[in-house]
Image: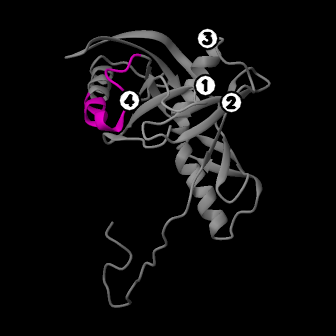
Amino acid sequence: MCGHGTIGVAVSLAYQGRMSLGIHRLETPVGVVSVELRSPNEVTVENVPSYRFYEALSLVVPEMGTVTGDLAWGGNWFFLVADAPCELKLTNAKRLTEAAQRIKDALRNQGITGDDGGEIDHVEFFGPPESSGADSRNFVLCPGNAYDRSPCGTGTSAKLACLAASGKLRPENSWIQESISGGRFEGSYRLDESGRVIPRITGRAYVYSEATLLQHPDDPFREGIA
């Protein structure tokens, strides 16, 4: 599951005339999600049930000391850290990436996983927002040591689950999550019939290029290399 990727898919399909305004369903590796195309560029994703697995886990991290964070599921597994090692600015991306990677390594080396045994492969730092109207700013390190330029849909879902578990955000109230690059997602959640947190993430995407793939009949690798 990928929140900003799902938003991009919906906007791309709308651009191609293959998706109309309204509610649609997309199948993802972690379950079916609901996608509401609100305009050609604005999408609300209703994510899979999300939850906090462990609150205030203390982790000893080489070169960083003890780091405390929550373990939560939002379509991916996250370790959410409230105290970032430095300001959440793009100029600090290298330092933040290195710190998040140390935390990921420590989680793996100490055998800490999600409740399904899944690897905690995303690390999320939080800090105060820079723009008015936002509730928080984040930095998210994804697999492959790439940081998310968006506020991260699954990361925001995990954050909403933690806020709900702590009683800090009521159902249907909004949470504006700002990314390290200044992008925003509006998050909220509802409770399903069994009391599970169902996050909703609203964001915008834009199509900025088109490409044409040419396949020459004489090219032995026109279908790619397996």
Q: CA distance from mark 2 to mark 3?
A: 15 Å
Badge 2 or badge 3: first in the primary sequence: 3
On the image, the x and y values in percent for residue 170 come to: 72, 18
Question: How far apart in space, not on screen, are marks 3 and 1 (Cα)?
Answer: 10 Å
Residue that badge 4 annotates: 88
- The answer to whether residue 115 is visible is no
Q: Amino acid at mark 1?
A: Leu
Badge 2: residue crowd in 10 Å (few <14, some 14–19, many ≥20): many
Q: Secondary structure at mark 1?
A: helix
Of labels 2 and 4, the one closer to you = 4
Q: Quadrant of residue 157?
A: top right
Query: Compared with residue 36, is residue 83 higher up or lower down, i.e. above or below?
Result: above
The answer to whether residue 221 is magenta is no
Q: Are marks 1 and 2 in contact (CB under 8 Å)?
A: yes
Structural distance between the alpha carbons of marks 4 and 3? 24 Å
| Residue ID for mark 2 | 188
- Three-letter amino acid code at disc 2? Ser
Determine crowd level at label 1: few under 14, some 14-19, many 20+ residues with C-alpha closer than 10 A. Answer: many
Which is more foreground, mark 4 or mark 3? 4
- Report, in whole angstroms, how far the alpha carbon at label 1 lies from the one at label 4: 20 Å
